[in-house]
Image (spheres, helix red, strand yellow):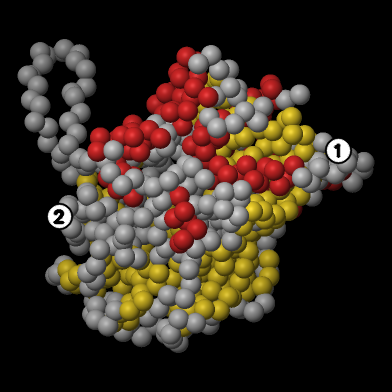
Amino acid sequence: MNSTLKITFLLLIVSSSLFGQVQSNLELIDIFNMEFVSDPQISPDGSKIVYVRNFKDVMTDKNLSNLWIVNFDGSNNRPITTGNQNDFYPRWSHKGDKIIFKSNSADDKMKLYMMWLDTKEIVPLTNTPKSPNQIAWSHDDHYLAFTMFVPKNHPSIIKMPAKPEGAKWNTPPTYIDDMNYRGDGAGYLKSGNTQLFTLSTDGGTPRQLTFSDFDHGAPIWSKNDSHLYFSANFHKDEEFKPIDSEIHQIAIKDGKITTLTNRYGPDRSPALSPDGTKIAYTGFDDRHQGYQISNIYVMNADGTNNKIISTTLDRSINNITWNTNGKGLYFQYDDKGDTKLAHISLSGNVTIKAENLGGLSLGRPYNAASYTVSNNDLFAYTLGGTNHPADLGVTDGKNSKRITALNDDLFSFKNLGNVEEVWWESSFDQRKIQGWIVTPPNFDATKKYPMILEIHGGPFSSYGSVYSAEIQAYAAAGYVVLYSNPRGSTSYGEEFGNLIHHDYPNHDYDDLMSGVDAVLKKGFVDDKNLFVTGGSGGGVLTAWIVGKTDRFKAAVVAKPVINWYSFVLYADGVQFFYKYWFPNKPWEDPSNYLKRSPLSYVGNVTTPTMLLTGEVDYRTPIAESEQFYAALKLENVETALVRIPGASHGIANRPSNLIAKIASILAWFEKYKD
């Protein structure tokens, strides 16, 4: 349903509530009516913000988006584009008189468009077979630089004989010899690489600048527009060193490439200082740890005088932008479940500019956010909260304001579960663990409620004080929900994250069980009606939990790893997991893989356990779930297998997939609830 129809429909419902309709709890179908803001882009002068307004269409089961524009003070909020399509990635010209964006409004092909702010005229700039990706304006606004995938021929050594005229043979065999041959969400990969291009803003044919057998990262322009800076991994053994990228410079005139950094580890996301003399970037010295925080580095534009400036902040940094005077940078980071916008001086002093960024993960309460800054140091950002998905927030670094409320039309007549932050000590080592308790609408603390322990994935990621449709759906069904950040979670520093290095899953179990005990002490949870679920890394832990205890009435293991030996050999990114999550290859130390695999403890399981995975998940392929399902069947444990057709690891690529996941979990729990 597009946003205009949604508003009209909901206004009719709201108006009827004025005549006696009572508040109601959220229903699964309401997910189709939830909207959120993403990618807010503030104009160079700070007066306006273009943002992506994301919505869902109940008839076509698609996630869609349009562009809207609003003044910094919140006035004149209006659409730039409309329709059931995907319009996204808006970017202002340096003069602020034009924007470019991507859209599939004309046909199924994703094209790059440009709009003039004075006339609102919109024209396509590209009609290429593949869509441009990361795009940057030249400083004179005459050119765009971008990355785009360029396929290449991958000859097969298999030579089939000529078939007789009219014969109907099978498609010829597919010949694969690349280490990375499939990707989650992308399927089986075509041969080729992401190359750099430039394009005149007057249109025409894009000019390809690079032709190598390596992928190239997002470009930025030099101050005089004669060069581009970008990140890439050009090492000959890059397949075995998957994150060892460097910052490079390429000359627009002749394509000459100069490498500016040289160390083992990722150097990425270059940002040019306002005067063009310095480059900041993020990265770390790679120690093959499971979790390594990204720092900020600054060097001269020619690669000399390289130094780290963020040594005092034990948090991973991203989305860096220079401030106007070139004496520091803005960035965002996650801290104890909250995403913050901050400034760091070149001497390393950090000051907070805004908090409560987030709201970009509609399904589960992950920390995810974005921001942009104007030339006069005004900010636009995605504003998170436990009672709404991402809205648009603005700040001058001191005073913040929420200027959209996209879901008030829905939430004005829907009851939400209350979210309360809690801390407890782990029974293993008394470390402080953070979590959140969500209680059902119309909660009565004198009653006893069933409880769901919901566990995040990653495992190196974090939940926070942000809205989650999935968590709220469980609360609406009458469950207390506990979600948390056990050891290994990000946003608590590198030491806390690496407590599970070469030891996952293990003592996360103690953190989670201590959290369950802490909630039980509050007195409103029925200890005979405990349930557990989690996805990806949370699926690993859910499968681990049922192999360690029978205190839960039922469990749903979503998109898990069950057998680490098999996982590291057929997950996408095969060159990564064995090196960063284990000390050796599987055949060099099989016992390590087996003792950390939930499959090894299946003989202990008595808990009714459902398995749920997308059929085209290539991160934790469905064969992992099928192994556990078969093992549980052989052990005569009550079990079921749910396959989500067409879904990858991010199950909610279609709105109905998210609904299907939630409905499946609730159905399994209701089956066993007293």
Q: Quadrant of the C terminus?
A: top right
Query: As drawn, is 235 to the left or to the right of 384?
Result: left
Is 274 above or below relative to 313?
below
Is 563 above or below relative to 289?
above
Q: Residue at x 65, y 30 (%)?
A: 552
Q: Quadrant of the N terminus?
A: top right
Residue density around tag 2, few if under 14, some if 14–19, many if 20 or more, within 10 Å: few
Q: Secondary structure at mark 2?
A: loop
Residue density around tag 1, few if under 14, some if 14–19, many if 20 or more, within 10 Å: few
Query: As drawn, is 207 to the left or to the right of 447?
Result: left
| Amino acid on which disc 1 is placed | Lys
Task: Please name whichever residue, 666 or 7, is drawn nearer the observer in this view of the structure.
Answer: 666
Task: Please name whichever residue, 246 or 46, is drawn nearer the observer in this view of the structure.
Answer: 246
Q: Residue at x 55, y 70 (%)?
A: 341
In the image, residue 119 lies at what x, y percent? 51, 67
Q: Rounded to the nearest whole Å, what is the CA distance between mark 1 and mark 2?
A: 64 Å
Q: Is residue 478 visible?
A: no
What residue is shown with label 1?
Answer: 447
Q: Nearer the viewer, mark 1 or mark 2?
A: 1
| Amino acid on which disc 2 is placed | Lys
What residue is shown with label 2?
Answer: 236
Task: Please name whichever residue, 506 or 218, is drawn nearer the observer in this view of the structure.
Answer: 506
